Amino acid sequence: MRDDRVDLIKIIQKSYSRLSKGQKLIAQFIMNNYDKAAFMTASKLGIKVGVSESTVVRFANALGYEGYPQLQQELQELIKTKLTTVQRLEMSNDYTNEGAVLKKVLKADMDNIKATIEEMDDVVFQKVIDSIFNAKRIYIIGLRSSSTLAEYLGFYLNLILDNVKIVTPGVSDVFEQMIRIGKDDVVIGMSFPRYSANTLNALNFTKEQGALVIGITDSKGSPISAISDYTLIARSNMASFVDSLVAPLSLINALVVAVGMREKSEIANTFSTLERIWEKHNVYNDKNTIL
């Protein structure tokens, strides 16, 4: 591997014009799907792109690597740290045409949902649901951009279950909110690029206390995947300065529905009570009033 840590995506972009036709196909695939390519062998990458394994090896050589394993290792390092916001902006060439942005973003979101469906392990999903119901307490943590996902999951699980706690950033430190966590508890941790160090630290702490950890993240190369007892993968690829959280949100919807279906009769009573409260206090504007 090269001694200098020049960004891999930049190297591919700079080298693109002098690559062979087959190597350009590899380059394009890696730039669009670096999280998938990071865990493919040279043979599988060649098959996926439609070139020979030797072409993949020569591609690695053309970028300055001794061989494909060195390129793959750097790809995996890229996954761990992801890209800085500035680097993502530099990758956003396809989004310069404002008229095409809407379709490109929606298409990327569709691709993320499709990949999430294809890669979802139904057995792991079932075990996650079982773990939620077996837990004494359920802690949900997601910081920075993932805080929206954590709040969303917590909001709905709180309507179904009475043992849910959302860990939030603020005056009270994250560790203070999780200080009583124990071996009978479950922690659902969410982390998407760029991965929050505080989320990882909190999950490591809960793991040390014996709690079961459920990770919701974007790839097996995510930092929280290595410490999670169960990991649910939801793709969030977006070659821009923001990440797509559409597939993660869809996965969370599936979790809520699956939990709700087990408690169908109980939540029916809960929502009947809530409807009366909402109507009494005018929580929703259900009147078709013409202003």
Image (cartoon, helix red, strand yellow):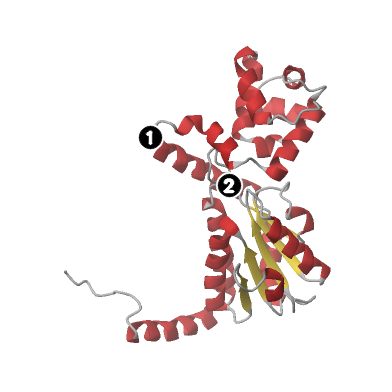
Quadrant for the C terminus, please: bottom left
Nearer the observer, 171 or 285? 171
Q: Which residue is mark 2?
A: 236
Amino acid carrying label 2: it is Ser
Determine the image quadrant of residue 226: bottom right
User: Residue shown at 72%/58% (left/top)?
Assistant: 200
Quarter of the image for residue 62 reads top right
Q: Which mark is residue 136?
A: none
Is any part of residue 39 visible from this angle?
no
Q: Which mark is residue 98?
A: 1
Residue at figure coordinates x 79%, y 23% from the top left:
65
Q: Position of residue 117 (x, y in %)?
A: 59, 49
At mark 2, the secondary structure is loop
Q: Decide if residue 142 is on the left or right side of residue 4.
A: left
Given residues 113 and 279, the one toward you in this image is 279
Q: Nearer the viewer, mark 1 or mark 2?
A: 1
